[in-house]
């Protein structure tokens, strides 16, 4: 999983195009668009992975909290009513 605070390197295709060096033919445009789409997909996948990991961590924390509450209720003599 990529660290969100670390800048992801851009592809050579992105770095080669500036306003004075626009894609000149269909092949260059196609390569440029493919590069942009790939970068977007990579960033989306990275963000999706981060979200899934955080949800998993949250689920683990909720499970631990539920267990601790159950233990406290048992220590206090309260029956678990499920």
Image (cartoon, rainbow, N blue to C red):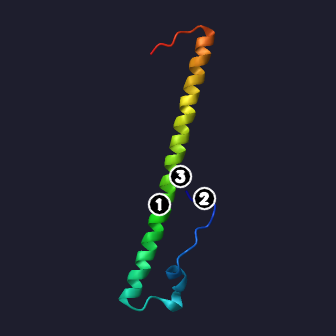
Q: Residue furthest front?
A: 1
Cα distance, mark 3 to mark 1?
10 Å
Marking on residue 50: 3
Q: Which residue is mark 2?
A: 3
Query: Dots 2 and 3: beta carbons under 8 Å?
Result: no
Residue underneath mark 1: 44
> In the image, 39: left or right of 25?
right
C-beta proximity under 8 Å, tags 1 and 2: no
Q: Position of residue 35 (x, y in %)?
A: 45, 76
Does 40 appear above or below 73? below
Q: Position of residue 59 (x, y in %)?
A: 52, 36
In the picture provided, is 45 more to the left or to the right than 1? left
Crowding near the residue tagged with mark 3, few <14, some 14–19, many ≥20 C-alpha atoms within 10 Å: some
Position above or below: 77 against 24: above
Nearer to us: label 1 or label 2: 2
Residue 28 location (% of width, % of height): 41, 86
Q: Secondary structure at mark 3?
A: helix
């Amino acid at each position: 999983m990529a660290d969100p605070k670390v800048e992801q390197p851009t592809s050579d295709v992105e770095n080669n195009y500036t306003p004075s060096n626009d894609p000149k033919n269909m092949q260059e445009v196609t390569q440029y668009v493919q590069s942009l789409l790939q970068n977007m997909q990579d960033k989306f996948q990275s963000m999706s992975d981060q979200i899934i990991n955080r949800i998993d961590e949250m689920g683990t924390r909720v499970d631990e909290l539920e267990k601790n509450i159950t233990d406290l209720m048992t220590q206090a003599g309260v029956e678990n009513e499920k």
